[in-house]
Image: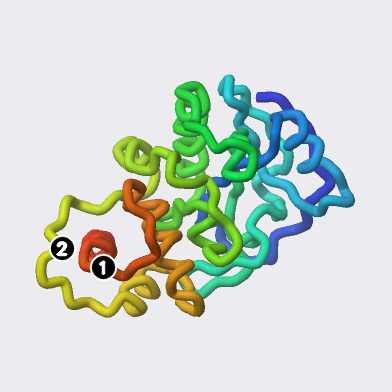
């Protein structure tokens, strides 16, 4: 792993556990542009790690420090997500500059890194999230091409069981809140959920399939 220290960090609050892993894409036109911004003191953004398309890993901020990657965010009642999370940026131009599939080398490197992180921190499966999960009104990364199911099959995060959407009568707001999402902007949160867990149809609609997928995830949490 290379090291490229970023000045954009501060101390984590005392007694707050590192219990979340937040995954991002860089959303910039090149790896170097992303690294320069994440190490630019005036930008006031950073992450703990960056993974390039060739699988190369760069460490920017020590895990014992609070990197500035999540911004205004929410998950399971918490709003200072930076304080309790590790942030990983995967180099990808994102939706603005030509969103593309993540490379095999990137996902292999991410899997190895995530396993290492999970072995050292008490991060439960539903706390492995995307930036869009914790900031649904602002963010779309890592996006609908990110292989969440593959990661879950490798012990990183969680994936819903196959479900039947017939006669699903759950309240979407309660289901979303129960899993962890904020519910102030319901269409945004539903869209974020679908971008993570139903990537073939992202429409922001609270249909029975979406509710069934949520219920399946909640059932696995109990």
Furthest residue in direction right, as rendered: 42
> Colour mode?
rainbow
Judge from the rendering whether residue 155 lies leftward or rightward of residue 181; answer left or right. Answer: left
Residue 48, image quadrant:
top right
Disc 1 designates what residue? Answer: 207
Mark 2 vs mark 1, CA separation in Å: 8 Å
Few, some or many C-alpha atoms within 10 Å of disc 2 (few <14, some 14-19, many ≥20)?
Answer: some
- Decide which of 17, 114 is in the foreground and name it: 114
Q: Is residue 67 above or below residue 76?
A: above
Judge from the rendering whether residue 58 lies leftward or rightward of residue 41; answer left or right. Answer: left
Judge from the rendering whether residue 216 lies leftward or rightward of residue 151; answer left or right. Answer: left
**Residue in the picture at 67% in, 53% down:** 69
Residue 174, image quadrant:
bottom left
Q: Do callouts 2 and 1 mark residues in contact (Cβ within 8 Å)?
A: yes
Name the N-terminal-most of marks 2 and 1: 2
| Residue 78 location (% of width, % of height) | 55, 72
- Decide which of 156, 101 is in the foreground and name it: 101
**Residue in the picture at 45% in, 36% down:** 115
**Residue in the picture at 55% in, 37% down:** 99
Few, some or many C-alpha atoms within 10 Å of disc 1 (few <14, some 14-19, many ≥20)?
Answer: some
| Residue 85 location (% of width, % of height) | 58, 55
| Residue 46 location (% of width, % of height) | 73, 47
Disc 2 designates what residue? Answer: 165
**Residue in the picture at 70% in, 30% down:** 30
**SS of the residue under disc 1:** loop
Quadrant (top left/top right/bottom left/bottom right) for the N terminus:
top right
Residue 34, image quadrant:
top right
Residue 23 numbered tag: none
**SS of the residue under disc 2:** loop
| Residue 67 location (% of width, % of height) | 70, 52
């Amino acid at each position: 792993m290379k090291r490229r220290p970023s000045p954009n960090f501060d101390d984590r609050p005392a007694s707050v556990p590192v219990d979340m892993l937040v995954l991002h894409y860089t959303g910039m036109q090149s790896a170097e542009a992303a690294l320069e911004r994440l190490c630019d003191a005036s930008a006031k953004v950073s992450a703990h790690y960056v993974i390039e398309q060739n699988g190369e890993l760069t460490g920017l901020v020590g895990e014992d420090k609070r990197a500035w990657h999540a911004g205004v965010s929410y998950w399971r009642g918490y709003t200072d997500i930076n304080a309790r999370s590790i942030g990983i940026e995967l180099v990808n131009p994102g939706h603005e500059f030509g969103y593309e599939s993540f490379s095999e080398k990137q996902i292999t490197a991410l899997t190895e890194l995530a396993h290492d992180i999970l072995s050292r921190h008490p991060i439960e499966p539903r706390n492995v999230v995307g930036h869009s999960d914790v900031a649904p009104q602002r963010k779309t990364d890592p996006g609908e091409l990110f292989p969440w199911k593959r990661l879950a099959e490798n012990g990183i995060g969680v994936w819903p069981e196959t479900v039947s959407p017939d006669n699903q009568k759950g309240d979407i707001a309660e289901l979303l809140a129960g899993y962890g999402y904020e519910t102030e902007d319901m269409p945004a949160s539903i869209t974020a959920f679908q971008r993570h867990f139903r990537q073939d149809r992202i429409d922001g609609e609270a249909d029975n399939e979406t509710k069934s997928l949520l219920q399946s995830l909640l059932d696995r949490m109990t």
